[in-house]
Image (spheres, rainbow, N blue to C red):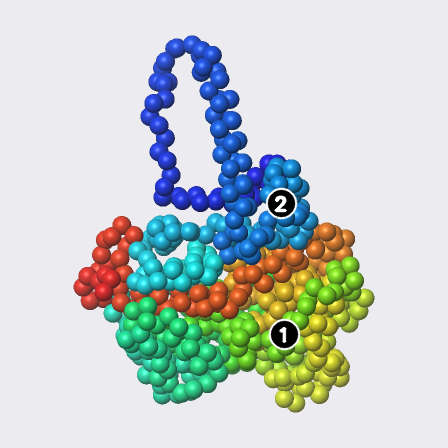
């Protein structure tokens, strides 16, 4: 047990750039001097000192609230009130371990600008973007994540790899002209002199994104941005394909953002634009014929060029959009949950119904003929109809089906739309893709039920919320759903542990401030790829298109 607990301990104020150098006073490996009493006692003394240091670090870590965590919490089962921590019991309950997991995440964040800079440079190979110091000050003062932005680094990497701010600026200017002309379902923004303004027509989310960016614009260099307000991503460009670099330079799409293949199934599968695996391990088997978007996308408007477009979700590596948090996850926004979560804890785990629960619309793909039988939400209802003792799933309305709607309702009668509180009465909740991401994942996690999730989509929080740790993943074709539910039924302790870990992450990490911090970091990178950057070792970057040296301006 002690070995397990010690492996979970946060590293306190450890700073990788302040590591002590090893002493060079060790005896020569060729020395034949016999080990005297003092030399034999040295290891014991050394171990004793390590023990004292360990106890001091533990006491220090838990006598102060962890970075980003609630003040006063400790892993002990009760407040120590000045008692000797060594005499107190650890809180090894599922609740205690769930809190400890999030506390450990916050505890490992950088605590100084120097440390955050070192970690950024190690991960990216670049100097931190201009304005990084102000960003660090803002997130640190609010106890937010500092070092957990690998999704951003990965999204921007292809544009840094081009090594041409000139090319990127020219591409964005082309896009601004297209967006301002109308019909793209995107917004164009420009940030000048510390103020962001929209330069295109209004639409969903326009003021939300403008307001968020204006919170930080004064501390971010000038930039232009293209935001996509469709649920679907737009940039069909596989950055991992062997010819990606040459294709990235060749902007060959004759009508960017107006590519609407019909059917989308042929475009993605037969033409090879996106073959998505049903599983991330084992022999490859595409799930294209089992996913509504890949079968018959509702909204399209794609481009096959590499262009820096900000979107809410994407399939990786088929799409190269840059991710940002969706307004659907902001508690303060109208687009967020339509009702408060009230008190999700008012239903104890043991009193929740032992079934998988789901309600939602028939969204996912444009229905044509009988293709809806292959779409994931319809397959979920088929599974529910076959095992009503295990799954309670119903459509609450029909969309994107035209004349097929009547036939669908005969096969799948509608159920009543229910509240979040009603959903929390069930021990197992399901999050399944619609047109793209469902937008309800975080709300489901907050209820303390075990969330099962089937998705092919990446979102900004994908690296933070981990399968088998915070939720139970289900294959896109749902072929393992029965199996996963049966596992939860026979493993109630582990199921509850995952449920509580997911709830803790949703409540304490996916906050409005954290979403703002993520968008703030995206703004810094947008400005950097347009204005120039330096490598981590200080070397200047030469624009490969103009031959001019670029750098921080």
* Camera sees residue 51: yes
Write down the residue under mark 1.
Answer: 340
Residue 369 lies, in percent from the top left, at 64, 83
Q: Which mark is residue 126?
A: none
Is the residue 198 above or below the residue 219 in the image?
A: below
- In this picture, residue 335 sits left or right of residue 448: left
Alpha carbons under labels 2 and 1: distance apart: 34 Å
Say which quarter of the image contains residue 486.
Answer: bottom right
Q: Secondary structure at mark 1?
A: loop
Residue 3 rendering spot, x and y as whole percentages: 60, 36
Marks 2 and 1 in Cβ contact (< 8 Å): no
Front: mark 2 or 1 = 2
Which residue is situated farthest in the left direction here? 548
On the image, numbered disc 2 is attached to which residue?
Answer: 80
Where residue 103 appears, as percent x and y from the top left, is: 55, 52
- Corner quadrant of residue 311: bottom left
Residue 183 or 2: which is nearer the viewer?
Answer: 2
| Circle 1 Cα neighbour tier, 10 Å, few/some/many (<14 / 14–19 / ≥20) | few
- Is residue 283 something that shows in the picture? no
Q: Is residue 152 left or right of residue 551?
A: right
Instruction: Reply above or below: 47 against 141.
Output: above
Residue under the image location 36 percent in, 30 percent down: 22
Q: Earlier in the sequence, mark 2 or mark 1?
A: 2
Instruction: Give the side of residue 27 with respect to residue 509, left or right.
Output: left
Q: Secondary structure at mark 2?
A: loop
Give the residue displayed 50% in from the left and 57% down from the top. Answer: 68
Q: How many marks?
A: 2
The image quadrant where one finds the N terminus is top right
Q: Residue furthest front?
A: 82
Residue drawn at point x = 70 percent, y = 55 percent? 495
The one of 530 and 444 positioned closer to us in this rendering: 444
Placement of the C terminus among the 4 image quadrants: bottom left
């Amino acid at each position: 047990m002690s070995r397990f607990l010690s492996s979970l301990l946060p590293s306190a104020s450890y700073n990788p750039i302040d590591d002590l150098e090893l002493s060079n006073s060790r005896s020569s490996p060729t020395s034949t001097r016999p080990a005297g009493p003092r030399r034999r006692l040295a290891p014991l003394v050394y171990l004793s000192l390590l023990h004292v240091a360990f106890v001091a670090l533990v006491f220090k870590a838990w006598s102060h609230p962890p970075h980003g965590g609630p003040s006063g919490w400790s892993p002990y089962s009760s407040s120590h009130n000045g008692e000797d921590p060594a005499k107190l019991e650890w809180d090894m309950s599922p609740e205690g371990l769930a809190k400890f997991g999030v506390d450990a995440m916050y505890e490992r964040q950088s605590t100084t600008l120097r440390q955050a800079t070192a970690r950024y440079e190690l991960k990216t190979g670049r100097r931190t973007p201009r304005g990084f110091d102000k960003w660090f000050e803002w997130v640190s003062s609010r106890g937010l994540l500092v070092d957990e932005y690998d999704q951003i680094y990965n999204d921007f990497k292809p544009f840094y790899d081009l090594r041409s701010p000139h090319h990127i600026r020219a591409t964005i200017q082309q896009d601004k002209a297209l967006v301002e002309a109308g019909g793209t379902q995107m917004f164009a923004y420009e940030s000048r002199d510390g103020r962001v303004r929209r330069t295109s027509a209004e639409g969903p989310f326009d003021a939300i994104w403008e307001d968020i960016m204006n919170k930080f614009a004064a501390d971010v260099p000038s930039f232009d941005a293209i935001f996509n307000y469709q649920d679907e991503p737009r940039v069909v460009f596989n950055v991992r394909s062997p010819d990606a670099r040459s294709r990235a330079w060749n902007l060959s799409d004759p009508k960017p953002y107006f590519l609407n293949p019909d059917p989308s199934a042929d475009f993605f599968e037969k033409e090879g634009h996106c073959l998505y695996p049903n599983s991330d391990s084992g022999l490859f088997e595409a799930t294209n014929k089992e996913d509504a978007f890949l079968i018959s996308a509702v909204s399209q408007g794609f481009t096959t060029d590499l262009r820096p477009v900000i979107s809410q979700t994407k399939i990786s590596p088929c799409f190269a959009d840059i991710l940002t948090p969706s307004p659907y996850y902001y508690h303060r926004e109208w687009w967020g949950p339509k009702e408060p979560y009230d008190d999700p804890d008012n239903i104890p785990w043991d009193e929740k119904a032992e079934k998988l629960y789901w309600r939602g619309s028939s969204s996912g793909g444009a229905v044509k003929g009988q293709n809806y039988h292959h779409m994931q939400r319809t397959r979920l209802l088929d599974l529910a109809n076959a095992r009503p003792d295990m799954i309670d799933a119903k459509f609450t309305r029909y969309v994107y089906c035209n004349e097929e709607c009547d036939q669908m309702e005969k096969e799948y009668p509608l159920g009543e739309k229910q509240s979040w509180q009603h959903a929390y009465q069930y021990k197992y909740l399901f999050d399944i893709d619609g047109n793209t991401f469902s937008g309800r994942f975080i709300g489901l996690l907050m209820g303390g039920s075990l969330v099962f999730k089937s998705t092919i989509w990446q979102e900004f929080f994908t690296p933070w919320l981990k399968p088998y740790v915070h939720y139970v993943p289900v294959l896109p074709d749902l072929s393992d759903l029965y199996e996963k539910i049966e596992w939860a039924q026979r493993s109630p302790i582990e199921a509850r542990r995952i449920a509580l870990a997911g709830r803790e992450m949703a409540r304490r990490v996916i906050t409005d401030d954290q979403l703002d911090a993520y968008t703030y970091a995206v703004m810094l990178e947008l400005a950097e790829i347009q204005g120039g950057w330096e490598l981590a070792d200080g070397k200047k970057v030469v624009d490969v298109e103009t031959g001019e040296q670029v750098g921080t301006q």
